[in-house]
Amino acid sequence: MEENPCFLSIIVPVYNGERYLEECLNSLLDQDLPEHTYEIVCVNDGSKDGSAEILSRYQTCHQNLRVLFQQNSGVAATRNAGLDAARGEFIWFVDADDFIQKNCLQGLWELAHSGNFDRIVLGGYEFVDALSPEERERANRGALPCNTSYQSSVIWRNLLRREFLMEKRLCFRYPELTNGEDGVFLYEVDLQNPRTVETPQVLYFYRTHAGSAETAASPESQQKKIRSHIRVLEILLGYYESGHRDPATANKIAAFLWMSLYEIAQVPRDRAKPHLQKLRAMGLYPGKIPPECTQRQSYLTGTGSAMGKVLEFFCHHLHRPWAYQGMRLLRGVQRFLS
């Protein structure tokens, strides 16, 4: 490997992440590149648990790990703080409750320098709570299949050249977004036509659990998530109406519309009504998928089981009132049976 003062900046937003933080940091440090060739930039977003103490301990032991502290500002502002501090040739965003494949950075370095690329797309594996012993064994052998297909919506499957981001003035421009901010960011990255290379190798392990931002089920978090996704739709509609009437934009609008309606269908009707009125005012509900849409799957639910296939059918048609009402009924039955 040629001498490079800093090939990669791994940015880790941290908010109350003490449960999995050490596993995450250990995976970032258990690598096959010398520590001086990459850095880990952890941004503690006003954590109230023991995250700060863990970060300080690791920073003392590892010269390539830096910790930034800020008042709680949300994930978009936290990622921007990491971007501003980063010095690496490439940027990789890693969540504090996830981890990466050990000894994978040498291969990424070689891939990055096999051409003049702005983006590297890598494989990811989603799991619930913890890998099973079999999954762990297969992960150690590099034999797990990539089970995520939506690379343009999840930031963690993308390494991005920092100079490209700076030249195009790309950052997380919407601090009000608590969910879906990476989907908007990557949409704006795609608009700049980055030179991209892909590897099918699973190098990122994405954890879902009861305490994560994506699965938190309190009424407050549900409302916040719905409002954020509707705001994403407003942003995407702005692009669509300003001339980006193409399949990529239409597909993104459809995906976030289905996602929003899927979430709205799970809240009480009195709380769902204002959100449906907002979507009507935006011209998206009922039945208003952009005609350029080519998306044939919602990616909201598994399709393996019979129930999964039923759910997927309804999810893909949620912009139609009959499917939305059917989803409300299905979710009610599921809650009753659970």
Image (spheres, rainbow, N blue to C red):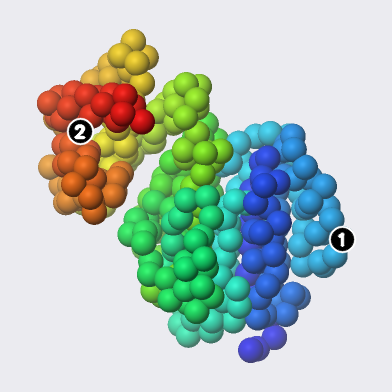
On the picture, is 327 further left or further right than 191? left
Looking at the image, is 292 positioned above or below residue 220? below
**Quadrant placement of the N terminus:** bottom right
The image quadrant that residue 245 belongs to is: top left
On the picture, is 255 further left or further right than 6? left
Q: Determine crowd level at label 2: few under 14, some 14-19, many 20+ residues with C-alpha closer than 10 A.
A: many
Point out the tag, 1 or 2, that comes first from the N-terminus: 1
Which residue is located at x 63 percent, y 62 percent?
Answer: 10
Residue wearing tag 2 = 318
In the displayed orientation, state which residue is furthest to the front: 337
- Can residue 241 be seen here? yes
Could you say which is closer to the camera, residue 134 or residue 71? 134
Residue wearing tag 1 = 60
Could you say which is closer to the camera, residue 169 or residue 280? 280
Which residue is located at x 51 percent, y 73 percent?
Answer: 137
On the picture, is 103 further left or further right than 197? right
Which residue is located at x 82 percent, y 59 percent?
Answer: 59
Residue 131 in percent (x, y) is at 51, 60
Total marks in image: 2
Disc 1 marks which amino acid?
A: Thr
Residue 117 in percent (x, y) is at 46, 74
Which residue is located at x 70 percent, y 46 percent?
Answer: 18
Looking at the image, is 274 positioned above or below residue 254? above
Disc 2 marks which amino acid?
A: Leu
